[in-house]
Image (cartoon, rainbow, N blue to C red):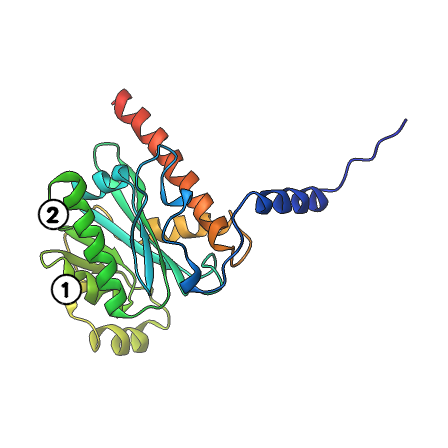
Amino acid sequence: MCLICPGYNSIKSQVTISRRKQLPPDITTFDEIPNESKYYKTKRDENFMIFKNNDLIVFQSPFQTELFSKNKHTFADGTFYIAPIFRYQVFITRTYVTELNCFYTTSFSILKNKKQATYEILFEEIKKNSSKYNSIEITPKIFHCDFEKAVSNAAQKVCINCQEHNYVQFLEFLEYFKKTYLINFETENWNYYDNIEHITNNVSETFNKYLKKLFAKKPTFFQLLSELQKEESKYYIDTKGELLEF
């Protein structure tokens, strides 16, 4: 008897369908997002979802909060590709853990827009969450992001003592640089001469590219949360093992 193995695309399609059947029914608007869900907990049954309003929902486990609080370099970036269809973007923060010489993702947020007020609430909630779990108030010393004024303004407003680092990509160098940076941004935000530790925001942008590989474009809300829950768990296991070895 001869058996024919199904093709890769056929198997992939069946696996995707099977996984979707295990998830709650899809939602299509922000108002349909539930206030409670098993995906709002980590695999260790700790709080994962820390804040939700009409414009954003923020996820940060106690483990992520601890890393975020204890290290000075914070990197932030948004991606539109994996945001559910009714949302604008998924926004992440990453932290350089000096002790391990490595970067870790320390929060996931789903945003309905890119208004400065929304980013301010996001950073304020992460700051409050740090105080809640670690009895300290987070004030990042160095904040790395791209040249999105809403993000950088919000970070400077919420974390008063932080140093904001925006890094330029030199395309059509002279004219573009003059019009975009010399005119619109304060010099100290992009020309920080003694920052030799981390000179770009590539670490967060690269992670967002990695997230894109986990999904088809515009996953469902619960598909996204399921994968983010797994990512948090994977980082927790890896980091705890490294800290024990250290």
In the picture of the structure, the residue carrying the numbered disc 2 is 137
| Residue 146 in picture, x, y percent from top left | 30, 62
Q: Amino acid at mark 1?
A: Lys
Q: Earlier in the sequence, mark 2 or mark 1?
A: 2
Query: Total label count?
Result: 2
| Residue 202 in picture, x, y percent from top left | 34, 52
Q: Which label sits in the foreground, 2 or 1?
A: 2
Left or right of 211 on screen, residue 169: left
Q: Amino acid at mark 2?
A: Glu
Quadrant location of the N terminus in the rendered image: top right
| Residue 34 in picture, x, y percent from top left | 40, 54
Q: Secondary structure at mark 1?
A: helix
Q: Is residue 153 above or below residue 211?
A: below
| Residue 228 in picture, x, y percent from top left | 41, 45
- Residue 176 is at least partly visible in this image: yes
Q: Give residue 157's mark.
A: 1
Identify the residue at image location x=29%, y=45%: 60
Pointers 2 and 1 in contact (C-beta within 8 Å): no
Near mark 1 (Cα within 10 A), the count class, few <14, some 14-19 or many ≥20, is: some
